[in-house]
Amino acid sequence: MSFYLSYGGGSGWGLILAWEVYPQESRKNLKIVFEHIFEELVSVENLLAAWQEFLVGKNQRYDVQEFSRDLLDNILSLHADLASGQYQHGGYESFYINDPKRRHIHKASVRDRLLHHAVYRLLYPFFDRTFIADSYSCREEKGAHKAINRFRSFANKVSKNHTRTCWVLKGDIRKFFASIDHRVLKNILVEYIPDEKIFALFSNVIDSYETESGAAVGLPLGNLTSQLFANVYLNRFDQFVKHRLKAKFYIRYADDFVILSESKTDLQELIKSLANFLSSDLKLVLHPNKIFIKTVGQGVDFLGWTLFPDYRTLRATTTRRMFQRIKESPEPLSLLSYLGLLSHGNTFTTRKKLLNDYWLWHE
C-alpha cells in the first residue's frame, strides 16, 4: 500500500481509503477485467496516438496551438509525471452554452484533455462490450436516430403491428451528471480494474471535479471521460431493468429512458422499483416532472421528436427554436443542418416552411 502514500500527493490518502473499502476480494470471480497495464496506458506511444485523435477539429484553437509548439516536450513531461506518480489533474475553465437549454460546461487544460483521450481510447472498447445493446448515448454505431428507430421496432412488436395498445413509460434522471456519486462510481470501476495504479489514476480524474466543494459528487460536462464514466455508472441501472425487472422493451439514451409494454398496470408497478434502485444503489433521483405513461397513439416525446405509430414529428419547442434561429441567422450551413435533421421524420410541411423562411430572411 506504500504506493498510495506517494501517488498524486495529498490525494493519495483518499485512494488508500478507496482500496480499503474495496478490497481485493471484491474483484474475485469476475467474468472480464481490464487487461491493459498502467505502463501501457501512460506510454509515450499511447499519448501520441491520443494526441492525433484529440487534434481532430481543434488545431485552430489557441490553447491547442500553444501546446503544439512544444508538443514532444509537453508529451514527454506528461508521461514523466504519470509514470512517476506525480501527475495531478488541473482545474477547469467554466462557461455556459445553450444546447438548447442552458448547460454549465467545465473545460480542462489541453494537457489533461490529452490524458482523457489516452484513457478513453483503451477503456472505451473494454467497457463497451459490457453495455446492453439498447444503450445508445456516446457509443460507436449508436446514437439518437438509431434509438428512435429501435423505439419504432419495439412499438411494432408490442402492438402486434398496431393491432393492440402499446403503453410507454418515459423517465428522466434529475441532474444526472451533477449527481454522480464518486464513491459509487469508483466502487463500480474497481470491480473491473485489477491494476491499482490505473485505478488510482482514474480516481485522480474523477476527483478533479465536484458539483459542490467537499460533496464528492458530479462529473464535468466537458470531459471525454465523463461520457464513458456516465455510461459505466448507468449500466448498473440498465442491467437491473433488463435482468431483474425483466423489461424486454427498454431503451436508454443518456439520462432518458423508455420502457414499452402491453400493460399500463405493469409499467405503473415498475416506477417504485426504478426509483428505489436509483436511490439506493446509484444515489440518483427520478425527475418527478418528467416521468409519464401514455400510449404510442397519443405521441411519445423522446429525444427531440414526438413519436407516433406510423410517423414522427419534430418536437414543437424544437421547431419554434429552429425557425427563430433561421430568422436571426439565415446561413446556408444552418439551413443544411436543419434540413438534415428534418429528413429523419415526417416533416414535409415543416421543411417547406423552413425553406420559405430562409429565402425570406436571407439577404
Image (cartoon, rainbow, N blue to C red):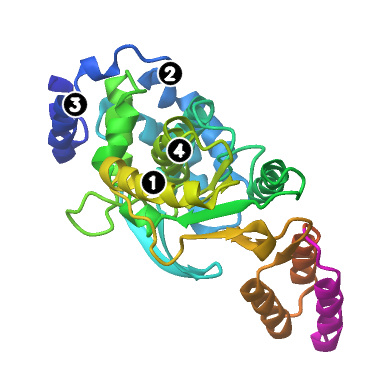
Q: Nearer the viewer, mark 2 or mark 1?
A: 1
Disc number for residue 241: 4
The numbered mark, 2 or 3, whose residue comes first in the sequence reads: 3
Callout 4 secondary element: helix
Q: Which residue is mark 2?
A: 36
Callout 2 secondary element: loop
Vertical comparison of 287 with 113: above or below: below
**Badge 3 amino acid:** Trp
Vertical comparison of 178 with 193: above or below: below
Vertical comparison of 205 with 330: above or below: above
Between 28 and 266, the one nearer to me in the picture: 266
Q: CA distance from mark 4 to mark 2?
A: 30 Å
Callout 1 secondary element: helix
2 and 3 marks in contact (CB < 8 Å): no
Q: Which residue is mark 3?
A: 19
**Badge 1 amino acid:** Leu
Q: Nearer the viewer, mark 2 or mark 3?
A: 3
Magenta span: predominant SS is helix
- Locate the C terminus and report the quarter of the image it occupies: bottom right
Q: Residues within 10 Å of mark 2 (few under 14, many from 20)?
A: some
